[in-house]
Image: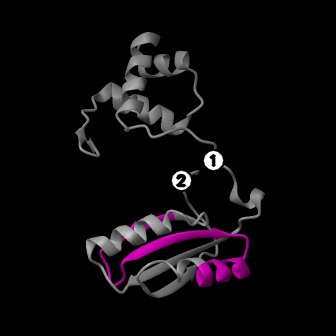
Amino acid sequence: MEIGDNPVHLDDLDRKIVAVLRQNGRITMTDLAREVGMSKTPCQVRLRRLIDSGVIRGFRAIVAPASLGLDHVAFTEIKLSDTREAALDEFNRAVRRIPEVEECHMMASSFDYLLKVRTADIRRYRVVLGEKISSLPHVASTSTFVAMETVKDASN
């Protein structure tokens, strides 16, 4: 595995630590060490290395979006008018500043980017699309697909 420009070698114990933490990021160090079959101190050292190397990028609370009034999910295809590196970099920097965009993926497809956009409702999505997404650098056209139900996501 390579993170950025730094090659990172993961052995079986590293992979076990990552697997356990993906299931329960709040596990205690003692329980993590026991779960992967190590003593606490070497487990702490490995965990620190996984964090410092960028394999583990952070820990966070996974919140039910509906509890925050963010029930609406739309996927937006973006076609750019310019796909040279400078234009892609400009688009990438700008899209990161839109809080409603949960995910942005460059695609190998008939369009250039796929965004996952979360808002309170279709009216708010329309405003985000019209005022933010369509105003991103080099956007030539967009197409929207509204999710009716989330069957599986990172939290389940």
Q: For the residue marked with disc 2, what is the amino acid?
A: Ala
Q: Secondary structure at mark 1?
A: loop
Position above or below: 140 against 49: below
Q: Residue at coordinates 77% horizontally, 57% vertically from top-left? A: 67
Label 1 with label 2: CB-CB less than 8 Å: yes
Q: Amino acid at mark 1?
A: Ile
Image spot of residue 55 (x, y percent): 37, 38
Residue 72 x %, y %: 68, 72
Residue 102 vertical placement versus 135 (above, below)? above
Instruction: From the viewer's side, name the closer residue of 149 and 55.
Output: 55
Reply above or below: 156 against 34. Answer: below
* Residue 30 sits above or below residue 9 on the image: above
Badge count: 2
Q: Residues within 10 Å of mark 2 (few under 14, many from 20)?
A: few
Q: Which residue is mark 2?
A: 154
Disc marking residue 62? 1
Could you tell me which residue is drawn at 37 percent across and 22 percent down? 46
Q: Which residues are magenta?
A: 103-131
Of circles 1 and 2, which is in front? 1
Residue name at image x 50 percent, y 63 percent: 96
